[in-house]
Amino acid sequence: LHKAIRRQRQMCIRDRCRFLMQSARKSQGAMAKKSNNETKRPKVPRSPKPSSSTTTKVMKANKRSNTKPELLVRKRLREAGLTGYRLHWKVPGSPDIAWPGKKVALFINGCFWHRCPHCNLPMPKSNVEYWTVKFDLNKERDERKIHELEEAGWKVHVIWECQLKKKTIDKTFEELLPILADELNKSLLVATD
C-alpha cells in the first residue's frame, strides 16, 4: 500500500515538473520571438529546387572547413614558422585561422560565395533573385564580422581563393607573411633550396 501511494506522489511530482518546464519553455519562446522581431534582418529566401541531381551533389560537396585553400594556407604558414594558430576560433565570424593571444585573424574566402572583388564573377543565370539576396547578405555578414573583430582590437586579413592559384600564390605570401610575422612578433623561417 505504501509503495503504491509513494508511486502516485512521484508521478504527481513528475507531472507538475513537466507542466512547469513546458510553461517555462513557452514563455521563453514568446520572449525570444519578441526580441527577434525587434532586430529583424532580411532572410535569404528558401533555396530553389535544384535543376538536376548533379547540382545537388555539387552543392552538398562544398565543405565548411578544411577546404583545399585552407589546407594550402596552413601548409605555407607552417613552412614559414608561423605556427600556434587556432582553427575556427570562437570569436565573431569564426576566422578560419586565428592567433587569439596576438588577436590576429585570417579569413580564407571562396571567390564564388563571398563575391571576390578581384574576379568579378558573373551571377548565376537561373534563380537570379535568390542568388542576388544570398550574395548581398553574405557580403554584408562578412563586412559586419570583420568590423566586429576590428572593433575588438583584432588585426584581420582576408585571402581570396584566386590569390592562391599557381600564378599568384607566391606573390600573395611574399606580401602577407612579413606582415603576419611582424604582428605575431615571430621571425620567418628561411627556406633552404
Image (cartoon, rainbow, N blue to C red):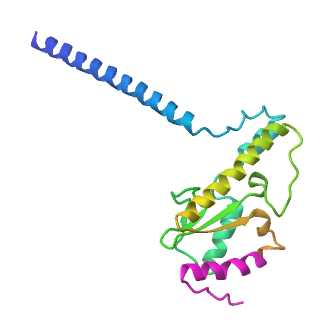
- Residue at the farthest left position: 2
On screen, residue 17 versus residue 155, left or right, reads: left
Which stretch is magenta? 170-193
Residue occupying image coordinates x 53% and y 60%: 89
On screen, residue 168 versus residue 60, left or right, reads: right
Percent of width and height locating residue 13: 23, 20
On screen, residue 166 versus residue 70, left or right, reads: right
> Taking the image as drawn, is residue 171 in sight?
yes
The answer to whether residue 10 is above or below residue 183 is above
**Most common secondary structure along the magenta stretch:** helix
Quarter holding residue 171: bottom right
Quarter holding residue 76: bottom right
On screen, residue 150 versus residue 62, left or right, reads: left
Residue occupying image coordinates x 67% and y 57%: 143
Percent of width and height locating residue 84: 52, 73
Residue occupying image coordinates x 72% and y 77%: 173
Residue occupying image coordinates x 85% and y 61%: 119
Total labels drawn: 0
Percent of width and height locating residue 124: 86, 44
Viewer-proximal residue among 182 and 35:
35
